[in-house]
Image (cartoon, rainbow, N blue to C red):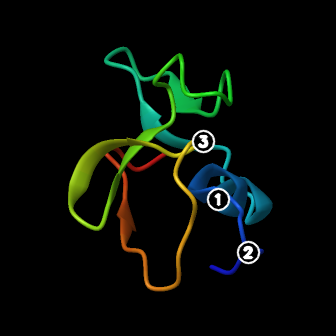
């Protein structure tokens, strides 16, 4: 995926049409909710580091992003 310089991981994902990238234990989709790092709904793994807030992390060339669930 590609994005703009300074864009967050969440911004890149949403720009590519991906609005959810994990699910709750009861199967409800989650992506960005608050957008300011408070709610933890946008957690994913970046370059092997788990529980990264996608709304707070700036995307970088070569980032490897993985999700907890296929959403």
In the foreground, 12 or 8:
8
Q: Residues within 10 Å of mark 3 (few under 14, many from 20)?
A: many
First in sequence: mark 2 vs mark 1:
2
Q: Which residue is mark 2?
A: 5
Q: Image point 56% across, 66% down: which residue?
A: 59
Q: Quarter of the image holding residue 13? A: bottom right
**Rounded to the nearest whole Å, what is the CA distance between mark 3 and mark 1?**
10 Å
* SS label for mark 1: helix
Residue 12 % position (x, y): 68, 63
**Rounded to the nearest whole Å, what is the CA distance between mark 2 and mark 1?**
14 Å
Whether residues under marks 3 and 1 lie with C-beta atoms below 8 angstroms apart, the answer is no
Q: Image point 24% across, 47% down: which residue?
A: 50
Which mark is drawn over residue 57? none
Q: Residues within 10 Å of mark 1 (few under 14, many from 20)?
A: many
Outermost residue, front direction? 6
* Left or right: 57 as drawn, with respect to 44: right
In the foreground, 29 or 39:
39
Q: Which residue is mark 3?
A: 55
Of badges 3 and 2, nearer the viewer stands 2
Q: Quadrant of the N terminus?
A: bottom right
Residue 21 % position (x, y): 50, 45
Which mark is drawn over residue 13? 1
Of badges 3 and 1, nearer the viewer stands 3
Q: Image point 38% across, 46% down: which residue?
A: 44
């Amino acid at each position: 995926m590609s994005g703009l310089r300074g864009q967050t991981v969440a911004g890149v994902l949403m720009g590519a049409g991906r609005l959810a990238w994990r699910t709750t234990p009861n199967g409800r989709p989650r992506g960005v909710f608050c957008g300011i790092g408070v709610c933890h709904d946008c957690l994913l793994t970046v370059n092997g580091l788990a529980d990264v807030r996608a709304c707070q992390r700036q995307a970088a060339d070569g980032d490897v992003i993985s999700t907890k669930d296929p959403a």
